Amino acid sequence: MLFRSITVMTDNSTNKFKLSRRKLLTGAAAASAGAAMFSGGSPYSFVKGAYAADFRNDPSKNSFIKLGFNVPQTGAYADEGADELRAFQLAVKHLNGEGDGGMLNTMKPNSLKGNGILGKKVEFVTGDTQTKSDAARASAKRMVEKEGVTMFSGGSSSGVAIACQSLAQEMGIIFMTGLTHSNDTTGKDKRRYGFRHMFNAYMSGRALGPVLKEEYGTQRRAYHLTADYTWGWTQEESMKDTTEALGWETVNAVRTPVGAGDFSSFITPVLNSGADVLILNHYGKDMINSLTQAVQFGLRDKQVNGKNFEIIVPLFSRLMAQGAGDNIKGILGSTNWNWALADEGSQAFVKAFGQEYGFPPSQAAHTCYVQTLLYANACEMAGTFYPPEVIKTLEGFKFDGMGNGPTEYRAEDHQCFKDVLVVRGNENPSTQFDLLEIVQEVPRSQVEYDASIFGGELGPYEV
Protein backbone atom coordinates (compact mmCIF):
# COMPACT_ATOMS: atom_id res chain seq x y z
CA MET A 1 0.00 0.00 0.00
CA LEU A 2 1.10 3.56 -0.73
CA PHE A 3 0.00 7.00 0.42
CA ARG A 4 -2.05 9.10 -1.99
CA SER A 5 0.27 12.05 -1.39
CA ILE A 6 2.97 13.05 1.01
CA THR A 7 2.97 16.67 2.08
CA VAL A 8 5.99 18.05 3.89
CA MET A 9 5.82 21.43 5.59
CA THR A 10 8.46 23.37 7.44
CA ASP A 11 7.50 24.80 10.81
CA ASN A 12 9.32 28.14 10.91
CA SER A 13 9.70 28.09 14.69
CA THR A 14 11.15 24.63 15.09
CA ASN A 15 12.42 23.84 11.57
CA LYS A 16 10.97 20.36 11.96
CA PHE A 17 9.05 18.54 9.27
CA LYS A 18 5.43 17.58 9.73
CA LEU A 19 3.58 15.06 7.63
CA SER A 20 0.05 15.90 6.60
CA ARG A 21 -2.97 13.69 7.10
CA ARG A 22 -2.96 10.98 4.42
CA LYS A 23 -5.19 8.23 3.00
CA LEU A 24 -4.09 4.76 1.96
CA LEU A 25 -4.57 3.37 -1.50
CA THR A 26 -4.64 -0.27 -2.56
CA GLY A 27 -4.52 -2.33 -5.73
CA ALA A 28 -4.24 -0.63 -9.11
CA ALA A 29 -4.44 2.85 -7.58
CA ALA A 30 -1.42 2.05 -5.39
CA ALA A 31 0.53 0.71 -8.34
CA SER A 32 -0.27 3.80 -10.38
CA ALA A 33 0.68 6.10 -7.52
CA GLY A 34 3.89 4.17 -6.96
CA ALA A 35 4.87 4.49 -10.60
CA ALA A 36 4.27 8.23 -10.45
CA MET A 37 6.27 8.63 -7.26
CA PHE A 38 9.33 6.80 -8.50
CA SER A 39 9.42 8.02 -12.09
CA GLY A 40 11.89 10.71 -13.15
CA GLY A 41 15.02 11.78 -11.33
CA SER A 42 13.56 12.07 -7.82
CA PRO A 43 12.38 9.08 -5.75
CA TYR A 44 9.64 11.09 -3.98
CA SER A 45 7.00 13.62 -4.97
CA PHE A 46 6.38 16.41 -2.46
CA VAL A 47 3.34 18.61 -3.06
CA LYS A 48 2.92 21.52 -0.65
CA GLY A 49 -0.64 21.83 0.67
CA ALA A 50 -1.95 18.66 -1.07
CA TYR A 51 -4.34 17.41 1.60
CA ALA A 52 -6.56 14.44 0.87
CA ALA A 53 -9.09 15.37 3.57
CA ASP A 54 -12.29 17.15 2.57
CA PHE A 55 -13.42 20.10 4.66
CA ARG A 56 -16.30 22.55 4.68
CA ASN A 57 -16.08 25.45 2.22
CA ASP A 58 -12.73 24.38 0.81
CA PRO A 59 -11.82 27.20 -1.62
CA SER A 60 -9.28 25.16 -3.60
CA LYS A 61 -11.56 24.96 -6.68
CA ASN A 62 -12.25 28.71 -6.67
CA SER A 63 -10.10 31.62 -7.74
CA PHE A 64 -11.02 33.37 -4.48
CA ILE A 65 -11.42 32.75 -0.76
CA LYS A 66 -14.38 34.26 1.05
CA LEU A 67 -14.20 35.58 4.63
CA GLY A 68 -17.11 36.56 6.88
CA PHE A 69 -17.12 39.71 9.02
CA ASN A 70 -19.85 39.53 11.65
CA VAL A 71 -20.04 42.83 13.55
CA PRO A 72 -22.61 44.78 15.60
CA GLN A 73 -24.08 47.19 13.08
CA THR A 74 -26.92 47.92 15.51
CA GLY A 75 -27.20 47.77 19.29
CA ALA A 76 -25.16 49.12 22.20
CA TYR A 77 -21.78 48.30 20.62
CA ALA A 78 -22.53 49.51 17.09
CA ASP A 79 -19.83 52.22 17.16
CA GLU A 80 -17.21 49.57 17.82
CA GLY A 81 -18.69 47.38 15.10
CA ALA A 82 -18.46 50.14 12.52
CA ASP A 83 -14.75 50.56 13.22
CA GLU A 84 -14.23 46.80 13.13
CA LEU A 85 -15.79 46.66 9.68
CA ARG A 86 -13.55 49.47 8.44
CA ALA A 87 -10.52 47.53 9.62
CA PHE A 88 -11.67 44.28 8.04
CA GLN A 89 -12.15 46.01 4.70
CA LEU A 90 -8.69 47.58 4.95
CA ALA A 91 -7.14 44.20 5.78
CA VAL A 92 -8.72 42.69 2.66
CA LYS A 93 -7.30 45.52 0.54
CA HIS A 94 -3.83 44.95 1.92
CA LEU A 95 -4.02 41.17 1.50
CA ASN A 96 -5.03 41.69 -2.14
CA GLY A 97 -2.06 44.00 -2.78
CA GLU A 98 -3.97 47.29 -2.70
CA GLY A 99 -3.05 50.39 -0.69
CA ASP A 100 0.22 50.83 1.20
CA GLY A 101 0.22 47.36 2.77
CA GLY A 102 -0.06 48.55 6.37
CA MET A 103 1.25 45.90 8.74
CA LEU A 104 2.22 43.59 5.90
CA ASN A 105 5.34 45.77 5.93
CA THR A 106 6.08 45.34 9.65
CA MET A 107 4.80 41.95 10.88
CA LYS A 108 7.40 39.31 11.64
CA PRO A 109 7.50 36.52 10.63
CA ASN A 110 5.52 37.26 7.50
CA SER A 111 4.68 34.81 4.72
CA LEU A 112 2.12 37.08 3.02
CA LYS A 113 2.83 38.23 -0.52
CA GLY A 114 0.07 40.77 -1.18
CA ASN A 115 -1.56 38.47 -3.75
CA GLY A 116 -4.47 37.28 -1.63
CA ILE A 117 -4.15 34.12 0.45
CA LEU A 118 -2.29 31.23 -1.18
CA GLY A 119 -2.71 33.10 -4.46
CA LYS A 120 -6.50 33.43 -4.13
CA LYS A 121 -8.13 36.83 -4.10
CA VAL A 122 -9.87 37.63 -0.81
CA GLU A 123 -13.59 38.44 -0.93
CA PHE A 124 -15.88 39.01 2.04
CA VAL A 125 -19.46 39.14 3.26
CA THR A 126 -20.80 40.97 6.30
CA GLY A 127 -23.44 40.38 8.95
CA ASP A 128 -25.07 42.24 11.84
CA THR A 129 -24.75 40.64 15.28
CA GLN A 130 -27.10 43.29 16.74
CA THR A 131 -24.97 42.92 19.92
CA LYS A 132 -27.08 39.79 20.60
CA SER A 133 -25.75 36.24 20.86
CA ASP A 134 -28.65 34.56 19.07
CA ALA A 135 -28.61 37.04 16.20
CA ALA A 136 -24.84 36.72 15.89
CA ARG A 137 -24.96 32.95 15.76
CA ALA A 138 -27.71 33.02 13.12
CA SER A 139 -25.75 35.52 11.04
CA ALA A 140 -22.56 33.43 11.28
CA LYS A 141 -24.45 30.25 10.37
CA ARG A 142 -25.79 31.97 7.25
CA MET A 143 -22.25 33.04 6.30
CA VAL A 144 -20.99 29.47 6.60
CA GLU A 145 -23.90 27.57 5.04
CA LYS A 146 -25.08 30.01 2.34
CA GLU A 147 -22.14 32.30 1.65
CA GLY A 148 -19.42 29.63 1.87
CA VAL A 149 -16.94 31.48 4.10
CA THR A 150 -13.72 29.67 5.02
CA MET A 151 -13.09 31.84 8.11
CA PHE A 152 -15.19 34.38 9.97
CA SER A 153 -14.37 37.06 12.51
CA GLY A 154 -15.99 39.89 14.44
CA GLY A 155 -17.68 40.42 17.78
CA SER A 156 -17.70 43.43 20.15
CA SER A 157 -19.47 41.38 22.80
CA SER A 158 -18.07 38.41 24.67
CA GLY A 159 -21.50 36.78 24.68
CA VAL A 160 -21.49 37.06 20.89
CA ALA A 161 -17.91 35.80 20.65
CA ILE A 162 -18.59 32.74 22.79
CA ALA A 163 -21.74 31.86 20.83
CA CYS A 164 -19.90 32.21 17.51
CA GLN A 165 -16.88 30.32 18.78
CA SER A 166 -19.07 27.37 19.76
CA LEU A 167 -20.69 27.42 16.31
CA ALA A 168 -17.25 27.52 14.67
CA GLN A 169 -16.24 24.36 16.52
CA GLU A 170 -19.44 22.60 15.48
CA MET A 171 -19.05 23.55 11.81
CA GLY A 172 -15.30 23.20 11.43
CA ILE A 173 -14.76 26.84 10.44
CA ILE A 174 -12.06 28.91 12.14
CA PHE A 175 -13.30 31.93 14.12
CA MET A 176 -10.80 34.72 14.75
CA THR A 177 -12.56 36.54 17.58
CA GLY A 178 -12.90 40.30 17.43
CA LEU A 179 -13.50 42.46 20.48
CA THR A 180 -14.06 40.08 23.40
CA HIS A 181 -12.73 40.69 26.92
CA SER A 182 -14.39 38.02 29.07
CA ASN A 183 -12.11 35.55 30.82
CA ASP A 184 -14.47 32.81 29.62
CA THR A 185 -13.66 33.28 25.92
CA THR A 186 -10.31 31.56 26.35
CA GLY A 187 -11.30 29.99 29.67
CA LYS A 188 -14.26 27.72 30.36
CA ASP A 189 -15.75 28.43 26.90
CA LYS A 190 -12.55 28.17 24.83
CA ARG A 191 -12.66 26.15 21.61
CA ARG A 192 -10.05 24.66 19.28
CA TYR A 193 -11.50 26.63 16.35
CA GLY A 194 -11.38 30.02 18.13
CA PHE A 195 -8.44 32.39 18.64
CA ARG A 196 -8.31 35.68 20.59
CA HIS A 197 -5.90 38.56 20.01
CA MET A 198 -7.70 40.81 22.55
CA PHE A 199 -6.55 40.80 26.19
CA ASN A 200 -9.02 39.80 28.91
CA ALA A 201 -10.59 41.00 32.17
CA TYR A 202 -8.02 39.24 34.35
CA MET A 203 -5.24 41.11 32.54
CA SER A 204 -7.04 44.43 33.04
CA GLY A 205 -7.17 43.80 36.76
CA ARG A 206 -3.53 42.78 36.96
CA ALA A 207 -2.42 45.80 34.94
CA LEU A 208 -4.53 48.31 36.88
CA GLY A 209 -3.76 47.06 40.40
CA PRO A 210 -0.39 48.76 41.02
CA VAL A 211 -1.59 52.04 39.48
CA LEU A 212 -4.75 52.08 41.62
CA LYS A 213 -2.70 51.44 44.74
CA GLU A 214 -0.31 54.25 43.95
CA GLU A 215 -2.98 56.81 43.05
CA TYR A 216 -5.89 55.91 45.35
CA GLY A 217 -4.27 54.06 48.24
CA THR A 218 -5.30 50.87 50.03
CA GLN A 219 -8.27 52.03 52.10
CA ARG A 220 -11.12 52.38 49.65
CA ARG A 221 -14.76 51.31 49.43
CA ALA A 222 -15.89 50.27 45.94
CA TYR A 223 -19.32 50.02 44.34
CA HIS A 224 -19.65 48.06 41.07
CA LEU A 225 -22.17 48.55 38.28
CA THR A 226 -21.83 45.58 35.96
CA ALA A 227 -23.13 44.64 32.52
CA ASP A 228 -25.20 41.53 33.09
CA TYR A 229 -23.49 39.00 30.83
CA THR A 230 -20.29 36.97 30.69
CA TRP A 231 -17.92 39.92 30.10
CA GLY A 232 -19.37 42.04 32.91
CA TRP A 233 -19.33 39.12 35.34
CA THR A 234 -15.69 38.26 34.76
CA GLN A 235 -14.66 41.93 34.69
CA GLU A 236 -16.35 42.47 38.05
CA GLU A 237 -14.74 39.33 39.47
CA SER A 238 -11.29 40.33 38.22
CA MET A 239 -11.57 43.86 39.58
CA LYS A 240 -12.83 42.59 42.94
CA ASP A 241 -9.89 40.19 43.19
CA THR A 242 -7.48 43.00 42.37
CA THR A 243 -8.94 45.72 44.61
CA GLU A 244 -9.68 43.47 47.58
CA ALA A 245 -6.09 42.24 47.45
CA LEU A 246 -5.07 45.92 47.80
CA GLY A 247 -7.23 46.18 50.94
CA TRP A 248 -10.31 47.75 49.32
CA GLU A 249 -13.78 46.80 50.54
CA THR A 250 -16.53 45.93 48.07
CA VAL A 251 -19.67 47.74 49.24
CA ASN A 252 -22.04 46.41 46.57
CA ALA A 253 -22.12 44.96 43.05
CA VAL A 254 -25.24 45.54 40.96
CA ARG A 255 -25.98 43.98 37.57
CA THR A 256 -27.41 46.18 34.81
CA PRO A 257 -28.99 45.14 31.48
CA VAL A 258 -27.04 45.67 28.25
CA GLY A 259 -28.46 48.62 26.33
CA ALA A 260 -30.31 50.06 29.34
CA GLY A 261 -29.82 53.64 28.16
CA ASP A 262 -30.94 55.25 31.42
CA PHE A 263 -28.79 54.24 34.39
CA SER A 264 -30.10 56.83 36.86
CA SER A 265 -31.97 54.24 38.97
CA PHE A 266 -28.70 52.31 39.37
CA ILE A 267 -26.59 55.37 40.19
CA THR A 268 -28.87 56.93 42.82
CA PRO A 269 -28.15 54.22 45.45
CA VAL A 270 -24.40 54.82 45.06
CA LEU A 271 -24.81 58.30 46.56
CA ASN A 272 -25.80 56.97 49.98
CA SER A 273 -23.85 53.70 49.98
CA GLY A 274 -20.71 54.89 51.76
CA ALA A 275 -18.64 53.96 48.69
CA ASP A 276 -15.89 56.34 47.59
CA VAL A 277 -15.14 54.60 44.27
CA LEU A 278 -17.54 53.61 41.47
CA ILE A 279 -16.27 50.89 39.14
CA LEU A 280 -18.19 50.88 35.86
CA ASN A 281 -17.96 47.43 34.30
CA HIS A 282 -19.71 48.78 31.21
CA TYR A 283 -18.67 49.09 27.57
CA GLY A 284 -19.66 50.98 24.44
CA LYS A 285 -22.72 53.24 24.64
CA ASP A 286 -23.60 51.75 28.03
CA MET A 287 -20.35 53.13 29.47
CA ILE A 288 -20.89 56.48 27.79
CA ASN A 289 -24.38 56.73 29.30
CA SER A 290 -23.59 55.44 32.78
CA LEU A 291 -20.46 57.60 33.14
CA THR A 292 -22.23 60.71 31.85
CA GLN A 293 -25.11 60.20 34.27
CA ALA A 294 -22.76 59.49 37.20
CA VAL A 295 -21.00 62.82 36.54
CA GLN A 296 -24.34 64.62 36.19
CA PHE A 297 -25.37 63.21 39.58
CA GLY A 298 -22.32 64.95 41.05
CA LEU A 299 -20.32 61.88 42.02
CA ARG A 300 -17.00 63.31 40.85
CA ASP A 301 -17.56 66.43 43.01
CA LYS A 302 -18.24 64.47 46.19
CA GLN A 303 -15.96 63.73 49.12
CA VAL A 304 -16.69 60.48 50.95
CA ASN A 305 -14.77 59.00 53.89
CA GLY A 306 -12.45 62.00 53.73
CA LYS A 307 -11.43 61.13 50.13
CA ASN A 308 -12.29 62.48 46.70
CA PHE A 309 -14.84 60.23 45.03
CA GLU A 310 -13.29 58.40 42.06
CA ILE A 311 -14.71 56.56 39.03
CA ILE A 312 -12.85 53.74 37.27
CA VAL A 313 -13.67 52.30 33.83
CA PRO A 314 -11.63 49.06 33.65
CA LEU A 315 -11.98 48.67 29.86
CA PHE A 316 -11.57 51.77 27.71
CA SER A 317 -11.64 52.57 24.02
CA ARG A 318 -11.04 55.80 22.12
CA LEU A 319 -14.57 55.59 20.70
CA MET A 320 -16.01 55.46 24.21
CA ALA A 321 -13.83 58.37 25.29
CA GLN A 322 -15.04 60.33 22.28
CA GLY A 323 -18.66 59.65 23.17
CA ALA A 324 -18.19 60.54 26.85
CA GLY A 325 -16.51 63.88 26.09
CA ASP A 326 -15.14 65.82 29.07
CA ASN A 327 -16.59 63.25 31.48
CA ILE A 328 -13.71 60.90 30.68
CA LYS A 329 -10.98 63.32 31.76
CA GLY A 330 -8.74 61.92 34.49
CA ILE A 331 -10.47 58.52 34.66
CA LEU A 332 -8.27 55.42 34.74
CA GLY A 333 -8.80 52.25 32.72
CA SER A 334 -7.02 49.77 30.47
CA THR A 335 -6.99 49.15 26.75
CA ASN A 336 -5.72 46.53 24.31
CA TRP A 337 -4.00 49.05 22.01
CA ASN A 338 -3.87 52.78 21.36
CA TRP A 339 -3.18 54.67 18.15
CA ALA A 340 -0.57 56.86 19.92
CA LEU A 341 1.85 53.93 20.36
CA ALA A 342 5.13 54.81 18.66
CA ASP A 343 6.20 51.35 17.45
CA GLU A 344 6.61 50.81 13.73
CA GLY A 345 3.69 48.40 13.36
CA SER A 346 1.19 50.61 15.17
CA GLN A 347 2.19 53.66 13.18
CA ALA A 348 2.02 51.75 9.87
CA PHE A 349 -1.56 50.75 10.69
CA VAL A 350 -2.52 54.24 11.89
CA LYS A 351 -1.16 55.76 8.68
CA ALA A 352 -2.95 53.27 6.41
CA PHE A 353 -6.24 53.54 8.33
CA GLY A 354 -6.03 57.34 8.45
CA GLN A 355 -5.41 57.61 4.73
CA GLU A 356 -8.43 55.38 4.08
CA TYR A 357 -10.92 56.91 6.53
CA GLY A 358 -9.59 60.28 7.69
CA PHE A 359 -9.25 59.50 11.41
CA PRO A 360 -7.23 57.14 13.65
CA PRO A 361 -8.37 53.57 14.40
CA SER A 362 -9.75 52.27 17.68
CA GLN A 363 -8.59 49.20 19.60
CA ALA A 364 -11.55 47.33 18.03
CA ALA A 365 -10.27 48.19 14.56
CA HIS A 366 -6.73 47.19 15.45
CA THR A 367 -7.52 43.76 16.86
CA CYS A 368 -9.81 42.86 13.93
CA TYR A 369 -7.25 43.97 11.36
CA VAL A 370 -4.53 41.95 13.09
CA GLN A 371 -6.75 38.87 13.38
CA THR A 372 -7.41 38.88 9.64
CA LEU A 373 -3.72 39.12 8.79
CA LEU A 374 -2.80 36.42 11.30
CA TYR A 375 -5.27 33.95 9.79
CA ALA A 376 -4.05 34.68 6.26
CA ASN A 377 -0.42 34.36 7.33
CA ALA A 378 -1.11 31.02 9.03
CA CYS A 379 -2.64 29.65 5.82
CA GLU A 380 0.46 30.72 3.90
CA MET A 381 2.76 29.14 6.49
CA ALA A 382 0.74 25.89 6.52
CA GLY A 383 0.45 25.87 2.73
CA THR A 384 -3.24 24.98 3.00
CA PHE A 385 -6.68 26.20 4.04
CA TYR A 386 -7.31 22.86 5.81
CA PRO A 387 -8.44 24.06 9.30
CA PRO A 388 -6.58 21.56 11.54
CA GLU A 389 -3.25 22.46 9.93
CA VAL A 390 -3.98 26.21 10.08
CA ILE A 391 -4.90 25.82 13.76
CA LYS A 392 -1.68 23.96 14.51
CA THR A 393 0.28 26.74 12.81
CA LEU A 394 -1.39 29.39 14.98
CA GLU A 395 -0.96 27.47 18.24
CA GLY A 396 2.16 28.75 19.96
CA PHE A 397 2.80 31.21 17.13
CA LYS A 398 5.10 34.08 18.15
CA PHE A 399 5.04 37.33 16.20
CA ASP A 400 6.01 40.98 16.40
CA GLY A 401 5.56 44.21 14.46
CA MET A 402 1.79 44.42 15.06
CA GLY A 403 1.66 46.68 18.12
CA ASN A 404 2.17 45.95 21.84
CA GLY A 405 5.57 44.34 21.28
CA PRO A 406 6.38 40.61 21.02
CA THR A 407 3.17 38.57 21.11
CA GLU A 408 2.29 34.87 21.39
CA TYR A 409 -0.84 32.81 20.75
CA ARG A 410 -0.58 30.42 23.68
CA ALA A 411 -1.23 26.88 22.46
CA GLU A 412 -3.03 25.75 25.62
CA ASP A 413 -5.95 28.18 25.39
CA HIS A 414 -5.49 30.28 22.20
CA GLN A 415 -5.09 33.44 24.29
CA CYS A 416 -2.71 36.13 23.03
CA PHE A 417 -0.13 37.44 25.47
CA LYS A 418 1.48 40.83 24.98
CA ASP A 419 1.96 44.12 26.82
CA VAL A 420 -1.21 45.81 28.17
CA LEU A 421 -1.87 49.54 28.37
CA VAL A 422 -3.12 51.43 31.43
CA VAL A 423 -4.65 54.69 30.22
CA ARG A 424 -6.26 57.82 31.61
CA GLY A 425 -8.75 60.20 30.05
CA ASN A 426 -6.57 63.01 28.74
CA GLU A 427 -6.99 66.22 30.76
CA ASN A 428 -5.61 68.41 27.96
CA PRO A 429 -6.19 66.75 24.56
CA SER A 430 -4.33 68.31 21.65
CA THR A 431 -6.84 67.04 19.06
CA GLN A 432 -10.34 65.56 19.03
CA PHE A 433 -8.75 62.10 18.90
CA ASP A 434 -6.05 62.62 21.55
CA LEU A 435 -8.38 61.41 24.28
CA LEU A 436 -6.46 58.70 26.13
CA GLU A 437 -3.11 59.29 27.79
CA ILE A 438 -0.94 56.18 28.16
CA VAL A 439 -0.04 55.94 31.85
CA GLN A 440 1.90 52.71 31.69
CA GLU A 441 2.80 49.98 29.20
CA VAL A 442 2.45 46.96 31.48
CA PRO A 443 4.76 44.08 30.50
CA ARG A 444 3.34 40.70 29.57
CA SER A 445 5.04 39.13 32.61
CA GLN A 446 2.78 41.13 34.97
CA VAL A 447 -0.49 39.96 33.40
CA GLU A 448 0.31 36.36 32.42
CA TYR A 449 -1.33 33.44 34.24
CA ASP A 450 -1.51 29.66 34.14
CA ALA A 451 -3.90 28.40 31.47
CA SER A 452 -5.60 26.02 33.92
CA ILE A 453 -7.09 28.68 36.22
CA PHE A 454 -10.14 29.35 34.03
CA GLY A 455 -10.81 25.73 33.06
CA GLY A 456 -12.40 24.58 29.82
CA GLU A 457 -11.34 22.22 27.04
CA LEU A 458 -10.29 23.22 23.53
CA GLY A 459 -11.82 20.16 21.90
CA PRO A 460 -10.66 18.19 18.84
CA TYR A 461 -8.92 19.34 15.69
CA GLU A 462 -11.15 17.14 13.53
CA VAL A 463 -14.88 17.92 13.66
Image (cartoon, rainbow, N blue to C red):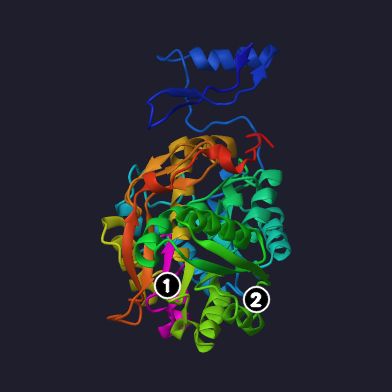
Kindly tell me whether residue 150 is visible in this rendering: no
Q: Position of residue 175 (x, y in %)?
A: 59, 50
Q: Residues within 10 Å of mark 1 (few under 14, many from 20)?
A: many
The amino acid type, in three-letter code, at marker 1 is Arg
User: Residue at 62% across / 83% down in the picture?
Assistant: 268
Kindly tell me whether residue 340 is visible in this rendering: yes
Compared with residue 371, is residue 395 higher up or lower down, i.e. above or below? above
SS for callout 1: helix
The amino acid type, in three-letter code, at marker 2 is Gly
Residue topped by disc 1 = 318
Q: Position of residue 242 (x, y in %)?
A: 49, 55
Compared with residue 228, is residue 391 higher up or lower down, i.e. above or below? above
What is the CA distance from the residue labelled 1 to the residue labelled 2? 19 Å
Q: Position of residue 75 (x, y in %)?
A: 63, 75
User: Residue at 50% across / 82% down in the picture?
Assistant: 299
Locate residue 456: give its quadrant.
top right
Q: Name the residue nearer the viewer: 218 or 80.
A: 218
Residue topped by disc 2 = 259
Q: Position of residue 149 (x, y in %)?
A: 62, 53
Residue numbers of the magenta segment: 315-336
Q: Is residue 235 magenta?
A: no
Q: Quadrant of the N terminus?
A: top right
Disc 1 and disc 2 in contact, CB within 8 angstroms: no
| Total residue callouts | 2
Q: Name the residue nearer the viewer: 211 or 463.
A: 211
Q: Earlier in the sequence, mark 1 or mark 2?
A: 2
> Looking at the image, which residue sits at the far front?
306
Q: Residues within 10 Å of mark 2 (few under 14, many from 20)?
A: some
Q: Is residue 324 magenta?
A: yes
SS for callout 2: loop
User: Residue at 53% across / 60% down in the picture?
Assistant: 179
